[in-house]
Amino acid sequence: MAVLKVLVIDDEPGIRSGVSRILNNFQVNYPFMDEDYTFEIQEAATGEDGIVIIDRDKPDILLLDNKLPGIQGIEVLEYVRNKKYDIVVVMITSYASLDVALKAHKFGATDFIPKPFTPQELKSSIENITKQQYLKRITHRMNEEGKKVRYQFLSVLSHELKAPLNAIEGYLRMMQEKQSGDRIEDYVTPIERSLQRIQGMRNLIMDLLDFTKIQLERKDEKIEEVHLSNIASSAIVTVQPYAIQMEVSIRLTVKTDAVIMADPTDMEIIFNNLISNSVKYNRRGGKAEIIIDCEKDDVVIAFTDTGIGITETDRENLFAEFVRIKNEKTRNISGSGLGLSIVKKVIELYNGIIAVESVADVGSTFTVRLPKKQTVNAQQT
């Protein structure tokens, strides 16, 4: 339950106690809110006392009388504006002339409540303000998260793309200057390494595109029957050249011809990432196996490898964004740190779960459970 702090500045004790009585047990909730809002009430009889509380406690809502002993309500409002406090101000006064109203609005007053007001008038105003505060906080949080993601994107791009581009440039200059000879055969190794670097950059770009697709509103989904064995076979074909290079054998075992209602692209993201990882983090000459089966209403897919494994400490942040396991065994393995976070987000869209079991230097098994039928999350647009 969330709490909004309300400060009442009014020289009439009856008004102050009336506001406290009405709002003390009042709760605001809308269907789109994830929690109820209640109110913590503070009182001040003068503008001077009110300013002390404003500076000290930073209330969320200010119910402000204009006619006060000493400094006037409009001066308190101007003070709040000059301090740039994030406070919603409502003027409560029987002296709300047009001039005062215009000035109060200019200084940032959100609403007016005339004296005397009914409990319902006060509650109605507070309900609207609470909705605005909730939406403002959600927007602020989304903006902050967006800034963080954009910063991480730029950091990953600058770091992950700069190194391969420098390497490719170096190899091309080596060939341009014919440092190793005049024949194309003299440059087989630089060409192969350049192609590997290009593939790494391509993988990074695809990861970023997948991540963006999951993060943004999903309007282009095409939910249909998807045979997971077909998706798995296509993913194996895609990663096969790298598996041959790594001397890793891949086996697909289909215990049940599992069919799921889903967007095929989403399923490709899951299989491509997990099968690629089972090769990338395997040992030379190792094995990778994908097992597809069904249990009641769920499809269960296990991705098993005989690779380097994952320590318990590394498993804690394995699915976080932009996180890569860094140790001596992964030093030469390129990646964006986005793959598993993307996989987890896709799985959660279908109300599924992913779990991992791993033993260092023995191997890992990633187990994915997905409901067969289309779910609410997968239909969202």
Image: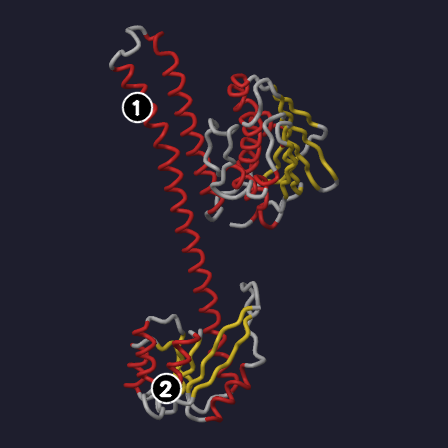
Residue 379 placed where, x, y %?
A: 57, 48
Q: Residues within 10 Å of mark 2 (few under 14, many from 20)?
A: many
Q: Residue at x 36, y 30 (%)?
A: 163
Q: Position of residue 96 (x, y in %)?
A: 34, 88
Classify mark 1: helix, strand or loop: helix
The residue tagged 1 is 169
Under mark 2, the amino acid is Gly
Disc 2 designates what residue?
A: 47
Task: Determine whether, in the image, residue 47 is placed left or right of residue 135.
Answer: left
The answer to whether marks 2 and 1 mark residues whose Cβ atoms lie closer than 8 Å is no
User: Label 1: few (<14), some or many (≥20) within 10 Å?
Assistant: few
Q: Is residue 261 above or below residue 95?
A: above
Which quadrant would residue 195 be assigned to in this image?
top left
Q: Name the residue located 52 percent from the left edge and 44 percent from the top edge.
A: 320
Q: Which mark is residue 272?
A: none
Q: Sequence order check: which comes first, mark 2 or mark 1?
A: 2
For the image shown, how many numbered marks are present on the structure? Answer: 2
Residue 144: image quadrant is bottom left
Q: CA distance from mark 2 to mark 1?
A: 68 Å
Question: Which residue occupies 44% across, 93% down?
Answer: 12
> Is 325 left or right of 200, judged from the image as shown?
right
Nearer to us in this view, 365 or 56: 56
Residue 1: give x, y in percent of width and height.
Answer: 58, 68
